[in-house]
Image (cartoon, rainbow, N blue to C red):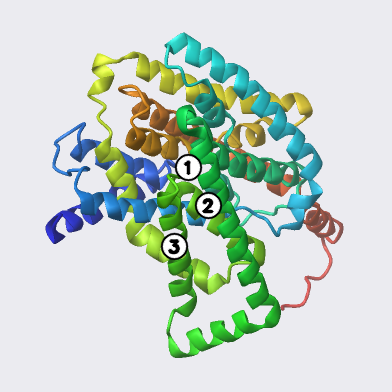
Amino acid sequence: MSFSVLALICLVALAGPVLSLTRGSHLPVVVGELAVGLALGATGLRVLPASDPTFAFLADIGFGLVMFVAGSHVPVRDPALRKGLGIGVLRALAIGALATLLGAGLARAFGTGHPALYAVVLASSSASMVMPALSGLPLDAKAIEQMLPQVAIADASCIVLLPLVIDPAHVLRAGLGALAVLVAAVAIYGVLYWLERSGRRQAIHHLSQDHRLAIELRLALTLLFALAALARTMHVSIMLAGFALGLAYAAIGEPRRLSHQIFAVTEGLFSPIFFVWLGASLNLRLLGAHPAAIGLGLALGLGALVIHALATLTRQPLPVAAITAAQMGVPVGAATLGTNLGVLRPGEDAALLLSAIVTVTAVAVLSGSVARLAIAGSPSKGAAKGAGSAGAGSAPPPAP
């Protein structure tokens, strides 16, 4: 890999933001990056060699950072998470049961032999997709309070389960590896918690800010890469390492400055590299020889939407229920890990990616409806609206 190739990757990755800003499309940025990877990789012009070890390594860094950001988006400290915990857990469990049945049916129908993998994909929710859709909205609406724990539980559970179900022949090894990564993440949380409670984290923050040292960013990257190294050694996906570290930071409260720095490093370079690499590594030409994979991808994506939408039977608003089907990390992780392990059938990795695209497109379509429900159902917004109506015709309040 050369600087010219890296420059090309960064240049074409701009297609992601351009497509997402197109009026009326509302496509997630990653869809454009994946499309560029497909066009220039094994599926299209074959200009970007996904097999290049340097390209693949940079993509691994991007994957770890993407999952770190996803974990940090889980609203662990949000009071709304506790308010809706009971019904959120029940809905997540009910969707998991339905996903198990549908996953078994799809595995039998398409003859792939991966019922547990499909169940995890169908049941998953992506905090990294859902939380940005709620950015800037009130989270105290009842429907949103009940949705947050549902998404958090489904996201975390499915990421932990993925390495266990994707390769049943080595489930014990995967289980021990996942346990080692989780124990290490808990230990990191303990250290971060001690730094926070002792005031040392705040002192480091001020020192870093005053002298422009980026100490917190350097520490976070060191921890991420160390956890990723442990995951690789224990034959576990980097996805789990990044997500677990993100949860640890979310639990103690990720500093805003660090959040901005991680976001810049991730979205500015490594995330586009990862998604372009992922698109370049997929060979959709195989779908011509295996057209059933297209049906499998659509069935997984639409099936996830239907299963999650059935939560309307528990009085969850349809747009809110459907948006919980958003998935990206789990299908992408399944495609990446399954390809590396050689356990997927030809075209099955592309089918998993297609299922993710179906769900994130639905999120783009439904995000406006969810925003309206969040605002309409917020007690604080409702109180403000009522106060404004009652005071009609009176003198305006003093300027702040």
Q: Is residue 357 left or right of residue 56?
A: right
Going by the numbered disc 1, the residue's amino acid type is: Gly
Which residue is drawn at the image coordinates 37% and 27% (left, top)? 343
Which residue is drawn at the image coordinates 64% and 42% (left, top)? 151
Q: Is residue 234 left or right of residue 161?
A: left
Label whose residue precedes the other's in the sequence (2 or 3): 3
Inter-mark Cα distance, 3 to 1: 20 Å
Question: In the drawing, what numbered circle is on residue 226?
Answer: 3
Q: Quadrant of residue 264?
A: bottom left
Label whose residue precedes the other's in the sequence (1 or 2): 2
Residue 71 at what x, y percent from top left?
Answer: 55, 53
How crowded pointer 1 is (Cα within 10 Å; few <14, some 14-19, many 20+) is rated as many
Residue 130 at what x, y percent from top left?
Answer: 57, 45
Residue 4 at what x, y percent from top left?
Answer: 12, 58
Which residue is drawn at the image coordinates 55% and 84% (left, top)? 204
Comparing labels 1 and 2, the label whose residue is closer to the camera = 2
Q: Secondary structure at mark 2?
A: helix
Question: In the drawing, what numbered circle is on residue 243?
Answer: 2
In this picture, is 125 found above or below 243?
above
Going by the numbered disc 2, the residue's amino acid type is: Phe
In this picture, is 380 found above or below 28?
below
How crowded pointer 3 is (Cα within 10 Å; few <14, some 14-19, many 20+) is rated as some
How crowded pointer 2 is (Cα within 10 Å; few <14, some 14-19, many 20+) is rated as many
Going by the numbered disc 3, the residue's amino acid type is: Ala
Whether residue 272 is visible here, answered yes or no, is: yes
Confirm or deny contact between disc 2 and disc 3 (CB under 8 A): no
Q: Which residue is mark 1?
A: 329
Which residue is drawn at the image coordinates 70% and 49% (left, top)? 375
Q: Secondary structure at mark 1?
A: helix
Inter-mark Cα distance, 2 to 3: 13 Å
